[in-house]
Image (cartoon, helix red, strand yellow):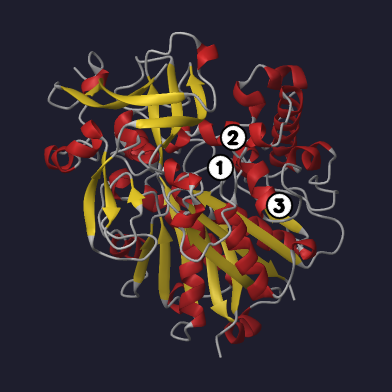
């Protein structure tokens, strides 16, 4: 029987929406990891293995970096594994950490990531080559330029320009509101902008705030968790789906093994994430209607497509879901309660760990910003990498 | 130097002479691959079939004719793509090739935006793209409206 996986500690560097030029990646990582160790109430020597995430070797100049990271954290000689899945790297590191605990080989595992884009000159180009490169980036097309996908969504569901503007603006405002009360967020302490201000911003303010940071989670087996923490959060289901970096391939679902339904007729469809969510729900023994709070990758229309992929709202209904307030902190299923990529900030190589921590905090009732007031039981964290090339869904529970 | 000629900044992740050579016929002639077992066609090239997982793959020459499935006009790049910042505006299209696969490409010479729409027929042409690290221009396929 597999070990049940528990989250027993979390830590992060605040404000992942700006650069931290005065600190090295080792310093950022050390801060988040030792906060997590402290939060878990364990010793660094209790950690038996680590699973790291970062954007990739082109970012920081280190190849095979896990030994350097373990050494910097004074964790050597434990094994260290690396995950590079574009923006979803943090989530895939978490997946691997869970696998390590479940295997029974480890009782305590560190999941940690960092983003340090200002260290290396060509970083930005490196990050943008989150693609198949020769047939897209080489031809002048980056995954971040995948506006084709964004447009497809609005076209397919006949969403008017007015509703597009209203829903993007409403989400941008909500994300800033959530961030304004969260001390870890970029917009902490900021006033919430007026509609007239957001209207002047690109995409009505619905664009992530990129920066640097680090975040860490301590995972443990259920037995270890019971003896070391009072409020563990358990990983109930999880799934990781890969498709293709090449956008052209998203137009053909038959390129995915075992997918008979050609539901993926267009790039605006979040089928890969739908598959990840369905598998995670199945593992957890729940349905979309059981989810009490959700984390989605918010960037232009990604939050709409992701929200629909989770099954929390129907296809083409996400803009209405946002506009009706169903995703607000006191709504049916609060979304991105820490502010998300837009309100909290986005630090690529570790970005996925921040929202996982927020779900943990909400389930524990210890959110640093807005806390969901009603009792909740299940939280879902989803994340994307390379524009739906990597899709991860994690269901957690406090029971 | 770098500031003076930003487009000439070398980008080792994509600019390898050998890599360009490997992909030469794909980038210049729209050569893809075909599974000899089940007949499925691929672009860009694959070495294993996604349908039957056969490794018996041969090169396949696409006609270069297709239909626009989706399009977008880029007037301001949200982010810089090396060597392409000066080439705005650009029309990016998803093309369903007559033979099946859908690919991403740039639409050249469209003159009027109204003519660019879903369902329009397009054909492949070869055009100059960005400059490489050694200052030579690179060439690759683009598409133009066929009528």
Q: Chain of mark 3?
A: A
Circles 2 and 1 in contact, beta carbons < 8 Å: yes
User: Farthest bottom residue?
Assistant: A1
Please state the horizontal and vertical placement of residue A382, each as a whole percent of the image.
Answer: 61, 55
The residue that appears at 61% across and 75% down in the rendered structure is: A6
Q: Chain of mark 1?
A: A
Labels 3, 1: one chain: yes
Helix, strand or loop at mark 3: loop
Q: Earlier in the sequence, mark 3 or mark 2?
A: 2
Please state the horizontal and vertical placement of residue A154, each as a whole percent of the image.
Answer: 66, 33
In the displayed structure image, the side of residue A12 where residue A290 appears, left or right: right
The residue that appears at 61% across and 64% down in the rendered structure is: A394
Q: Residues within 10 Å of mark 2 (few under 14, many from 20)?
A: some
Q: Which residue is mark 1?
A: A266
Q: Residues within 10 Å of mark 1 (few under 14, many from 20)?
A: many
Q: Quadrant of residue A126?
A: top left
Q: Earlier in the sequence, mark 3 or mark 1?
A: 1
Quadrant of the snapshot with the N terminus of chain A: bottom right
Total labels: the figure holds 3
Look at the picture and state if A227 lies above or below A348: below
Q: Which residue is mark 2?
A: A152
Quadrant of the snapshot with the C terminus of chain A: bottom right
The residue that appears at 54% across and 72% down in the rendered structure is: A219
Q: Which residue is mark 3?
A: A368
């Amino acid at each position: 029987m597999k070990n049940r996986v528990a989250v027993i500690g979390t830590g992060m560097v605040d404000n992942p929406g700006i650069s931290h030029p005065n600190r090295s990646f080792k310093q950022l990582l050390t801060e988040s990891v030792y906060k997590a160790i402290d939060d878990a109430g364990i010793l660094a020597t209790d950690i038996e293995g680590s699973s790291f995430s970062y954007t990739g070797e082109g970012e920081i100049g280190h190849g095979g970096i896990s030994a350097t990271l373990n050494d910097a954290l004074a964790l050597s000689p434990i094994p260290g594994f690396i995950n590079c899945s574009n923006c979803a790297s943090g989530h895939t590191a978490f997946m691997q950490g869970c696998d390590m605990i479940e295997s029974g080989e480890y009782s305590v595992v560190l999941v940690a990531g960092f983003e340090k884009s200002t260290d290396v000159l060509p970083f930005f180009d490196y990050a943008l080559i989150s693609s198949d490169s020769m047939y897209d980036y080489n031809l002048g097309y980056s995954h971040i330029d995948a506006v084709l996908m964004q447009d497809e969504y609005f076209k397919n569901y006949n969403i008017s320009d007015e509703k597009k503007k209203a829903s993007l603006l409403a989400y941008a405002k909500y994300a800033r509101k959530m961030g304004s009360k969260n001390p870890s967020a970029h917009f902490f302490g900021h006033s919430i902008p007026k509609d007239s201000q957001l209207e002047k911003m690109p995409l009505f303010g619905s664009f992530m705030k990129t920066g640097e940071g680090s975040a860490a989670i301590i995972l443990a087996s259920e037995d270890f968790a019971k003896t070391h923490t009072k409020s563990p959060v358990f990983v109930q289901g999880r799934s990781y789906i890969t498709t293709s970096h090449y956008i052209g391939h998203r137009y053909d679902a038959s390129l995915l093994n075992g997918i008979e339904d050609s539901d993926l007729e267009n790039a605006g469809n979040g089928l890969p994430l739908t598959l990840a969510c369905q598998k995670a729900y199945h593992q957890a023994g729940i349905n979309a209607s059981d989810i009490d709070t959700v984390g989605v990758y918010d960037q232009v229309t990604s939050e709409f497509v992701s929200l629909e992929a989770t099954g929390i709202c129907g296809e083409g209904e996400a803009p209405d879901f946002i506009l009706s307030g169903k995703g607000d902190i006191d709504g049916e299923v609060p979304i991105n309660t820490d502010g998300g990529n837009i309100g909290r900030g986005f630090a690529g190589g570790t970005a996925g760990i921040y929202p996982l921590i927020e779900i943990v905090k909400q389930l524990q009732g210890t959110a640093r910003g807005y806390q969901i007031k009603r009792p909740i039981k299940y939280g879902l964290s989803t994340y994307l990498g390379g524009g739906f090339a990597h899709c991860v869904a994690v269901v957690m529970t406090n029971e | 130097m770098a500031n003076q000629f930003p487009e000439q900044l070398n980008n080792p992740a994509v600019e390898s002479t050998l890599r360009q050579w490997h992909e030469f016929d794909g980038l210049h002639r729209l050569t893809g691959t075909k599974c000899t077992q089940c007949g499925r066609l691929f672009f860009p090239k694959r070495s294993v079939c996604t349908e039957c997982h056969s490794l018996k793959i041969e090169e396949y020459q696409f006609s270069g004719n297709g239909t626009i499935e989706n399009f977008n006009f880029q007037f301001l790049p949200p982010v810089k793509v090396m060597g392409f910042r000066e080439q705005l505006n650009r029309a990016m299209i998803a093309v369903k090739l007559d033979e099946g696969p859908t690919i991403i490409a740039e639409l050249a010479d469209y003159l009027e935006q109204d003519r660019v729409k879903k369902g329009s027929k397009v054909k492949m042409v070869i055009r100059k793209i960005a400059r490489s690290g050694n200052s030579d221009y690179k060439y690759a396929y683009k598409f133009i409206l066929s009528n």
